[in-house]
Amino acid sequence: MIDAQPAETDPPEKATLICRDCSHESDVDGDWIVHTEHERQMYDCPICGTTITARYERGQPLTI
Ligand SMILES: [Zn+2]
C-alpha cells in the first residue's frame, strides 16, 4: 500500500532572504555568509557583500 501523500498544502518552513541591493535570493540556510554579531544573525550577501540583518520567527516571513 502506498499512502496518498497530500499535495503541498503547507508552505515550506524555510524562510527566504532577499538582498536589498542586488535582489539575490536564497534560503536562510542557503549560500549566505552567516555570522553572529551581538547575538544577532547577520547574513552577508555572497554576490555583493551587503550585510543583511534578519529577524524572523519560525515559519514567519522575514523582516529585513
Ligand atoms: Zn546582494
Image (cartoon, helix red, strand yellow):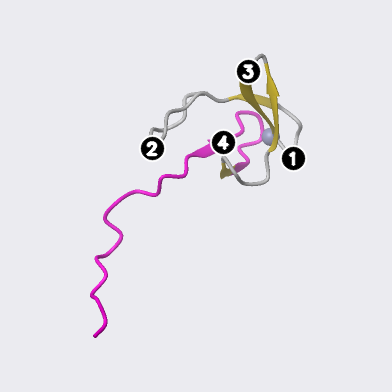
Residue kind at label 4, given as amino acid type: Ile
Q: Are marks 4 and 1 in contact (CB under 8 Å)?
A: no
Q: Residue at x 55, y 36 (%)?
A: 17
**Alpha-carbon distance for marks 3 and 1?**
24 Å
Q: Are marks 2 and 3 in contact (CB under 8 Å)?
A: no
Residue kind at label 2, given as amino acid type: Gly
Task: Assign a secondary structure to mark 1.
Answer: loop
Q: Nearer the viewer, mark 2 or mark 3?
A: 3
The residue that disc 2 covers is: 59
Task: Assign a secondary structure to mark 2.
Answer: loop
Give the farthest residue toward the top. Answer: 38
**Magenta run includes residue 41:** no
Q: Are marks 4 and 3 in contact (CB under 8 Å)?
A: no
Task: Assign a secondary structure to mark 3.
Answer: loop
Asked whether mark 4 and ligand 1 are closer than 8 Å, the reply comes as no
**Alpha-carbon distance for marks 2 and 3?**
20 Å
**Alpha-carbon distance for marks 4 and 2?**
16 Å
The residue that disc 1 covers is: 47
Q: Nearer the viewer, mark 2 or mark 1?
A: 2
Asked whether mark 2 and ligand 1 are closer than 8 Å, the reply comes as no
Q: Nearer the viewer, mark 3 or mark 1?
A: 3
Q: Which residues are magenta?
A: 1-25
Give the farthest residue toward the front. Answer: 1
Other residues around mark 1 within 10 Å, as few (<14) / some (14–19) / many (≥20): few
**Alpha-carbon distance for marks 4 and 1?**
12 Å
Q: Quadrant of residue 33?
A: top right
Q: Earlier in the sequence, mark 2 or mark 3?
A: 3
Q: Quadrant of residue 41?
A: top right
**Magenta run includes residue 6:** yes
